Amino acid sequence: MVDTLTPVLTANWSAERSWTLESYEQHGGYRALKKALTMAPDDIITAVKDSGLRGRGGAGFPTGMKWSFIPQDNPKPKYLVVNADESEPGTCKDTPLMMASPHTLVEGVIISSFAIRANKAFIYVRGEILHVIRRVQNAVEEAYAAGHLGKDIHGSGFDLDIVVHAGAGAYICGEETALLEGLEGRRGQPRLRPPFPAVAGLYASPTVINNVESIASVPSIIDHGAEWFASMGTEKSKGYGIFSLSGHVTRPGQYEAPLGITLRQLLDLAGGMRQGPDGQPRQLKFWTPGGSSTPLLTAEHLDVPLDFESMGEVGTMLGTRALQLFDETTCVVRATLRWTEFYKHESCGKCTPCREGTWWLAQTLAALERGEGSESDLDLLLDQCDNILGRSFCALGDGATSPISSSIQFFRDEYLAHLTHGGCPFDPAASTAWAGKATAGARA
Amino acid sequence: MALDEKTYGELREIAGRYPEARSGLLPMLHLVQSAEGRVTPEGIQACAEILEITPAEVSGVATFYTMYKRRPVGDYHVGVCTNTLCAVMGGDEIFSRLKEHLDVGNDETSEDGKITLEHIECNAACDYAPVVMVNWEFMDNQTPESAVALVDDLRAGKEVTSTRGPRLCTWREAERVLAGFPDGRVHEGPAAGAPSLVGLGIATERGWTAPEGSDAGRGTDLTGAPADVAAASDASQEAEAAAVEEEAPTATTAAEKKEAQ
């Protein structure tokens, strides 16, 4: 029986100066690298395949399979690109990982590059997390000094250079082909596929693009074995993952657990929903399982396992395990409008359904929130969603429809209440972190 | 005003980090902002010359990304997250209080040139909501009162430290780090804030860990896994791979699989 929480990636975060090479190595860091360098690259790919590791950036594509798509007979250089552009609303796992233990990522990059035979790797970190960038830059520097990077790493004959690349503010660059455009010094607009990055990615060369947490999981798989990893989680969603709880919960934060844990279990550990002014815990009203692009769920889904399959069965996605929890003080129309404004702002403008559609969605929703419009506007919204979902160039447009269609599904009456009430019936002050408390300047 | 020789040299140095020089454009524009206080026509010209592309191509990039500013930015860029979760938790109230207190609108700079206020999108710190960023450093768990005190301290020239990071530098100094020139502040601040450690703390308290791996007998991997799991895993491997292929969630993956065949 596997324990409820299984700290692996988070295990060293409370260690003294955990971000340094010295601390990381004291906790077993770079042991997996030494072992990997004695293995055949294909055996590393096999181990990652056998572990069942699926992409931790949201889509859940099997990581080892992605690696095996790299055509090794292609004479062009191969590249590994780490997607550290963590921007999906609610998602906050890669950022603390890179802040507390950037060497876990760097070690993962070296092993993964060795496996796919890349001699150059890039870590594309969003520009808005300055201290995280410092820590990653420093980890790369320390790894060079220790001989973990550079020429002929530990006498293996393998060369690797890592470039830490800071983005400049664009949610769309979390989409892997838009990220490549950004990394090539262009506007971050997605590319048409095929060709896929595995064949023609960065500089039209074979490229693997993986999320931070996926790559950071690789050293543990090499160190402890594929079966060890697969002994956690469910049959098809194997291993551990970081679950990020935020919002109206007593103890928000990072909880590392096997995939398949339920929100009820996590909420229990997190002390339940926050207390109301009467001292009673408030009710969970709605939540996102994996960021705002994953359709909303409600309290009736508390016992659905948080794995790829079970989330799919209830009409949503596991996504990035960004569990944003909202209690009954929150207006779902306000929440949905704000997400919609986000997608509108971040739409890259390349394709018509998303560029135009997100503006129409925001406009229709804004009117509803003000209590203007009519019930038929809900059908109009759903029709607009229908014209965007599956018709936009990349997943951004699809994601924009998720909060709208799911909130109408579960909270149609609340939309209508805005019409009968002539505006929002909720008091925004009641949903704040300081509601019911005397607000002292709490800045540390 | 033309860029100085040192800046030109550093711009070339950035371009030289990449197999293809144009990849340096994003960090180069960060350096331009550091040197010039914004993306200036001269900075665009310099990038274009070094990369042998047109100024229009550089401008096209500079106008796409939200961190690039065409108007001067104050010493401190104060970003208030007003994406849904932070907004609901109080980000909206913080933002409106700061607008009023500083007498500025969104993306405007206070009269003394110290503070540029902007509402920002999710900054990946949702477990510390409501979040304010100063020069892209975390100021976690803010209230309207703490945010007002924060900008007052910044305007008064007091030293302010990130709640989860180092002493704050200026916006232009921060842009230099983003361009890939470290400032020596990496070891300031903690490894993690309390919410980042909450799950780890509970696990430690209850003695919960990941299963024993081959850790103990280093190098003899696979021995640590329970036999039944290993066997089950062997048996179902092929079926599982097939199932995963069939059930892959996105169009991308479906197409990637076709490509693989």
Image (cartoon, coloured by chain):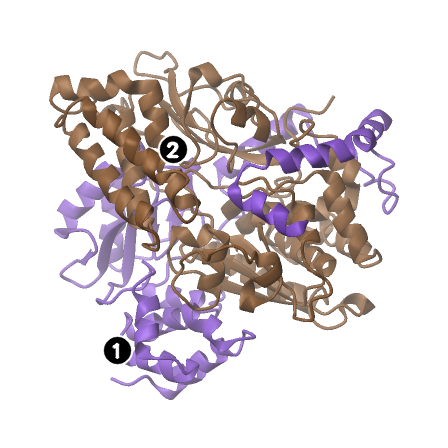
Chain colours: A brown, B purple
A175 to the left or right of B157 = right
- Nearer-the-camera pick, B68 or B73: B68
Residue type, numbered disc 1: Pro
Residue in the foreground of this view, choosing between A410 and B239 = B239
Residue A176: x and y in percent read 50, 53
Q: Measured along the vertical axis of the image, is residue A378 above or below residue A19?
A: above
**Is residue A212 among what the camera can see?**
yes
Q: Is residue A328 above or below residue B145?
A: above
SS for callout 1: helix
Q: Secondary structure at mark 2?
A: helix
Q: Position of residue B123 (x, y in %)?
A: 39, 46
Image spot of residue A56 (x, y percent): 57, 42
Residue at position x 30%, y 71% from top?
A: B59
Q: Read off the residue under disc 1.
A: B41
The quadrant of the picture occupied by the N terminus of chain B is bottom left
Q: Residues within 10 Å of mark 1 (few under 14, many from 20)?
A: some
Which residue is at a point 73% across and 60% down the rendered structure image?
A114
In the foreground, B19 or A85: B19
Q: Is residue B120 visible?
A: no
Q: Which residue is mark 2?
A: A402
Mark 2, mark 1: which one is toward the viewer? 2
Q: Residue at x 13, y 17 (%)?
A: A420
- Tell me the residue at 67%/39% (across/down): A8
